[in-house]
Structures are given as structure tokens and as C-alpha cells.
Amino acid sequence: MHADRLLTALRERFGHAELRGPQREVIDAVLAGRDVLLTMPTGGGKSLCYQLPALLLDGLTLVVSPLIALMQDQVDALRAKGIEAAFVNSSLSAGERRERLDAAVKGRLKLLYVTPERFRSADFQSVVAQLNIVRLAVDEAHCVSQWGHDFRPDYSRLGEYRARIGNPPTIALTATATPRVAEDIVAMLALREPLIVRLGIERPELFLAATRVELAEEKLPLLAERVRQIDGPGIVYSTLIRDLEDLHVELKRRGVHSLVYHGKLSPQERRSMQARFLSSRDEVVLATNAFGMGVDKPDIRFVLHAQVPRTLEQWIQEVGRAGRDGGPSWCEVLYFEEDLAIQQNFVEWANPSREYLMHVYETLRGWGERVQTKELSDLRDELLIKNRADNRVSICLKWLEVLGVTEGSFESHDLRVVRELEPGELPDSVGSPEKRRADLEGLLAMARFAGLAEECRRVLIARHFGLADPPTPCGACDVCASGDEWRASRFSARNSGPTAARDEQGWRRGDWVRVDGRHLGQIVKVEGEGRRQRLTIESTGDLARRTVDPRRQRVERLER
């Protein structure tokens, strides 16, 4: 295809003057009908590698994407550029789905976005053979592999679905894939002699850092101080909702406004938080890892992690949301050894045993027609699930749905068991000891990365993903450069709101302080005057009260 036509479409539809890095090689391969596996960090321009060819190819590019919100954002962005694109998913009425599929059949669309679950729906199956699919794009392709950090049962059947639609040339895209995951993607999708392009974090504008903390109460002051040091939009990730709420209070006390985003909020509240963040110039959002997929905000200046994520792949994906405008961004993870126990629980809850899945099935079958009067909470109670984060039940329900054992859902009160299940039918990945061990090894790799500071962060990342070592020193990690100097030379401090006026000659009841650089607490009583004051401080760690003499111990006031 003539290069002028390619560059004209790039400039007129996407607003770019030229392609970056390996984009040209990948796009040429897509246009030539080759299978492709592309691993490129978040913000590197993966989507362009199938969206631009879709404009130039005759026929339809079918895009498999994991999240409804993500595909809606992508379609909205494409339509704003005048590109014929649509999505079909469960958020639409049956009439809307038929209308969009009809438009695809009649050739009025260039790109059609679907979730992998769509291949199991009757309305889609009835028309898929009529679609002129010339290219299949699989986004978040690591979900295909049981060795990936976000394995999803429906993704594991995409090789089968691809065969059903005639094995069109396929491009698989992901932000992170170890060599083992990359091999699994190729095998599971049955890619034929694919072009494989795998990149690391070649983004010098991101400063990568990990800070070890010895006590839990050190976290809040450290995170709050980072937020105050860096003006501009940012994200603070935490595994635990209560930690987000505590940080929200701490920031408010220091005059810094923040948004809080987590699964306990209603869908409307979450959409509102995301919209406010996207439109803001300096908003800070405190979030669980549910936030960020599809958040295309170019000017995010920092991404902080209050706990180590479950895998290095997850961390790379989340920090990749920073600095997409090419500006400097700070990416830091706090390493507190006790947090590993939290993540180890998540690993266990992500790997229900085969016996557990059969127990879920037997419970549903035992309920008979009464199942349609039940809620998900009833099933969790029946199975003695006490922790909200324990998602074994949800994973088992998804497997039963994918295997065609159940139809409907608790939410719509039409769940039913439609066939019997024998243990021998379960895929090898269900309850696999190897998968559980691989998940624990992934957590160990993340812990080693965050807990050690002996070698360039980018070198450690490259080795984890089986890539060539980058040049060192990289100049943008806490091993190769001074983080304090890097921040000071690139960021201005955040403007904070007013705080209560105080008498600088002494301490006051209600002051938040840190004692000897370690113990965080609040002053509940002040005795004496001037330099002879003695303070009673209630520790946030154990609520114990201690008497402190500021002349003999180092007491730092945390409000500025």
C-alpha cells in the first residue's frame, strides 16, 4: 500500500505527523495480512497499529476488548475522528445490538468492538458468518494465557472463536507479557508465523522508584508528602479501601482535595469520579486497581502505589498511564513486608480448586428452581465466604457460564443450571497447582523488585520480560539518580488549601505529629508552657497514649 496514503490517514484522522518506534513495521505487517503479537507499554500507541490499517483495508476489523467502559471510550474517540466504529455488548438493548450488527453486515463500519463473551450470544452467532471480517484484533491479549496476570476464562476460547470466523489475520496486543505468556498467546490463538515485537519501558520521562517502609504508620505521611511535592493530576493506588479513605482524610487535613474511587461506590459515582479526573488540571484520585483501564489522560504527573501490586506486570501497566504527553512523571511503589500477606490472600482467592468449583455447581443444582430467588450474597453465605475480596465464587460462576453449564445471572434473577457437569470436563487451568505456584512466583518477583535497590530498575524490568538490557545508568530511576533532585528540577509544589492558624511558640491539642521519624499520632493533651511543654500523643497504630518531651525526642508537626 502506498506510503503517502498511510501517512495522509495518520495525519488527517489521528493528528500525528509520523509513526513512532516499531509502529511502521507492525502496521506494514498488518496490511500485508500477517499475524502479529505486539507487546508495548501502556501509552505507547498499540491501538493505532490496528486502527490505522482498519481505515485502509476493505472490510471489517473485529476488536475483542475486555471491558465495556474501555470499548465505549475507544469507540467515542474514533467516532470523534470521523471513523466508522461501534461496539456491541450487554449494555445495549436487543434492538440497539441488532441495529449495529446490521450496519456491520452492510459494510457501514470499519471497526466493531465486542467482548469475548459476545461469541456465546445467539444474536451474534446468527450474523457473524455474514460479516466481512478481514482482521481480528485481540486487546489485552495476556488475558488469553493462564500464566498472564489477568487470566479470563472467555479469553481462553478465543482460538476456537477465531477458527469459527475463518481464521482471519490476527493482531494480539498487550502492555506486558513475559516470554512464557507470549508463547502461550501465540499457541492459544494459533497465530501463524507471527511478527513478534516486544518492547520494555523505553520511556525516559517516567522516574521509577520503590521505597521500603518499616512501619505501617509511615505510609500516610510519605504518600501525602509526595502528593504535595508534585503539582498536577495523579493517581494513588491502594489494595485496601480503608487505606484510601485514611489517605483522603490525611490529604484533606493538609489542605489537599482528592477523589476516592473504589468498588463500593455506585456506577454513577464511579463515572462521576472518572469524568472529574479526566477534565481536571490538578485533581488527585485515590483508587483501587479497578480505576485506570481506558483512562486516556495524557498529563498524569504521578502514579503512587501504597502497596506492592500482585505482579510486576500489573505495576508496569498502571505506571504506564503516567506521562503520555511526554512530560516528566513520578512512579513510586511503597514496599511494606506485611503487605505481601494481603497479596498472597488475593493469589489464593484467584485460584479456586477443582473441588471448590464443583461445590459451587452442586450448591446451584441443589437449589433447583429456587436459584432464581437467590442473590450472589446467598451463595457466598452458603459457602462461608466472609471477605468481600474473596472472589472464588465469581471466578467459579464465570467458568460454569463459559462451559455452558449455567445461563443467566444472579443480577437479572434468571440464573439456571442447563446441563450437568462432570469433574473430568474441567480445563486443566482450573485449580492448577502450577498456575497457583506461577502466581506466587509473580508476587515474589514484584517483592524482589520493590525490596531491592541494587541495580537499575529498567534493567530488572527488561530481564523479567526477557528483553535486552537497556543502557545504564538510565538517569530516571532511584538506583541511577537522586529522586529528590529529579523531582525538584522538574516539579513545583502543589498549591494546598488553607490550614488552621497556630501559635508557632508551642504545640496544640489536635496536632498530628511524627515522633522520632517513626510513630504517627495525634496530640490529645498539652501540659506546661513554651519549651517546657510535655505532650500526650495517641498513636494511630495501636491507639496507645504516650507522654513525649519534645526537648528529648524529635517531634515533627505534619501539618504545613
Image: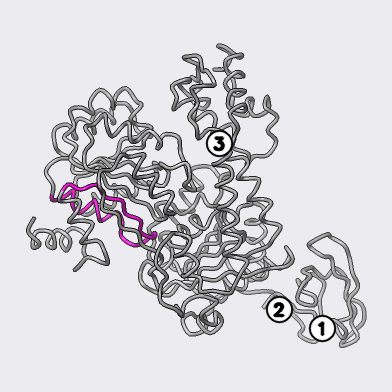
Camera-side residue: 273 or 176? 176
Q: Are marks 1 and 2 in contact (CB under 8 Å)?
A: no
State whether residue 407 is above or below residue 151.
Answer: above
- The residue type indicated by label 1 comes to Gly
Is residue 42 magenta-colored? yes
Identify the mark nearer the N-term, 1 or 2: 2
Question: Where in the figure is residue 549, as x and y percent of width and height?
Answer: 89, 80
Secondary structure beneath disc 2? loop
Question: Looking at the picture, which amino acid does disc 2 mark?
Answer: Ala
* Residue 506 badge: 1
Q: Is residue 190 left or right of 268 when viewed as pictured?
A: left
State the extent of the magenta-drawn residues as a range.
Answer: 33-56
What is the spatial separation of the Cα atoms under label 2 and label 3, in whole angstroms?
A: 60 Å
Residue density around tag 1, few if under 14, some if 14–19, many if 20 or more, within 10 Å: few
Question: Which residue lies at the image location 65% right of the left edge and 71% below the top edge?
Answer: 222
Few, some or many residues within 10 Å of mark 3 (<14, 14–19, 20+): some
- Residue placed under numbered mark 3 in the picture: 432
Q: CA distance from mark 1 to mark 2?
A: 12 Å
List x then y, in percent, for residue 374. Answer: 59, 21
Give the secondary structure at mark 1: loop
- Element assignment for label 3: loop
Q: Earlier in the sequence, mark 1 or mark 3?
A: 3
Q: Residue at x 26, y 63 (%)?
A: 22
The amino acid marked with disc number 3 is Ser
Of circles 1 and 2, the one toward us is 1
Which label belongs to residue 501?
Answer: 2
Return the x and y of residue 40 as percentages of the image width and height: 35, 59
At horizontal 53% and vertical 60% (from top left) the residue drawn is 285
**Label of residue 424 in the image:** none
Front tag of 2 and 3: 3
Image quadrant for the N terminus?
bottom left
